[in-house]
Image (tube, rainbow, N blue to C red):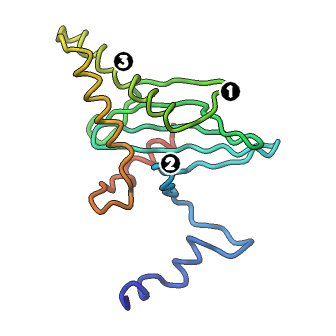
């Protein structure tokens, strides 16, 4: 435990959890309940909080735009990205208007978006693949995106992904 105590310096703790009136270090925050990183938070002039959430696996990145209005949480959009070398490319985007956010809805939409992308890619390559096989792969990808960052085997390429998302 001595090494951990030495690693957590007062400066580090103050940058991550500052006292009132001091700025917090601008890093994405892992939300274990939603299984995603929260970043790009801002409060509108009317007092509503909006943020972007990001989750990813070894093949795709999913970005949610979320709005908290009064006591309701809405999903504003879902974006699906693929890796192209060390860059991200947008594959699908869906916008929503006054749709309540819940995990089941986001998962189903993400599976559908991946299935649509794969089906269209296979069709353009003139490759016939059963819909059940496409759905199986889409479900596996989405499940991989819900892995906990706190898991010891989680890939930490977040430092390369976040800057690309922030610039969009």
Query: How far apart, in angstroms, are the residues tagged by discs 1 and 2?
Result: 20 Å
Secondary-structure class at tag 3? helix
Task: Please give the name of the residue rendered at 28% of the width and 38% of the height, measured from the top-left corner.
Answer: 59
Using a 10 Å C-alpha cutoff, classify the residue at mark 2 as few (fewer than 14 neighbours), some (14 to 19) or many (20 or more).
some
- Is 32 on the left-hand or right-hand side of 158? right
User: Which residue is the site of mark 1?
Assistant: 98
Secondary-structure class at tag 1? strand
In which quarter of the view is residue 74 placed? top right
Secondary-structure class at tag 2? loop
Q: Pointer 1 and pointer 3: residues touching (CB < 8 Å)?
A: no
The percent position of residue 38, horizontal first and vertical second, equals 54, 51
Please tell me whether residue 166 is drawn above or below residue 5 in the rendered image: above
Task: Please give the name of the residue rendered at 29% of the width and 20% of the height, measured from the top-left corner.
Answer: 118
Q: Residue furthest left?
A: 127
Dot placed on the residue nearer the N-terminal end, 1 or 3: 1
The percent position of residue 51, horizontal first and vertical second, equals 61, 45
Query: How far apart, in angstroms, are the residues tagged by discs 1 and 3?
Result: 24 Å
Dot placed on the residue nearer the N-terminal end, 1 or 2: 2
The percent position of residue 113, horizontal first and vertical second, equals 40, 23
Using a 10 Å C-alpha cutoff, classify the residue at mark 3 as few (fewer than 14 neighbours), some (14 to 19) or many (20 or more).
some
Q: How many marks?
A: 3
In which quarter of the view is residue 19 placed? bottom right
Task: Please give the name of the residue rendered at 19% of the width and 14% of the height, measured from the top-left corner.
Answer: 129
Question: Considering depth in this image, is 30 or 7 the residue closer to the camera?
Answer: 30
User: Which residue is the site of mark 2?
Assistant: 34
User: Which residue is the site of mark 3?
Assistant: 116
Task: Please give the name of the residue rendered at 66% of the width and 39% of the height, measured from the top-left corner.
Answer: 73
Please tell me whether residue 99 is drawn above or below residue 67 in the rendered image: above
């Amino acid at each position: 435990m001595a090494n951990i105590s030495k690693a957590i310096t007062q400066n580090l703790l103050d940058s991550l959890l500052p006292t009132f009136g001091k700025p917090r270090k601008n890093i994405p925050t892992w939300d274990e309940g939603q299984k995603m990183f929260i970043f790009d938070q801002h409060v509108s002039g009317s007092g509503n909080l909006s943020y972007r959430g990001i989750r990813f696996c070894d093949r795709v990145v999913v970005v949610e735009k979320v709005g908290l209005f009064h006591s309701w949480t809405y999903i504003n959009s879902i974006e699906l990205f693929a890796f192209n070398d060390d860059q991200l490319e947008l594959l699908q985007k869906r916008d929503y208007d006054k749709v309540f956010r819940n995990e089941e809805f986001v998962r189903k939409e993400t599976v559908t978006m991946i299935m649509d992308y794969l089906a269209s890619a296979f069709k353009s390559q003139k490759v016939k693949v059963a819909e059940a096989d496409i759905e199986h792969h889409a479900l596996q990808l989405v499940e991989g995106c819900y892995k906990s960052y706190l898991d010891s085997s989680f890939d930490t390429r977040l430092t390369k992904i976040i800057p690309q998302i922030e610039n969009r």
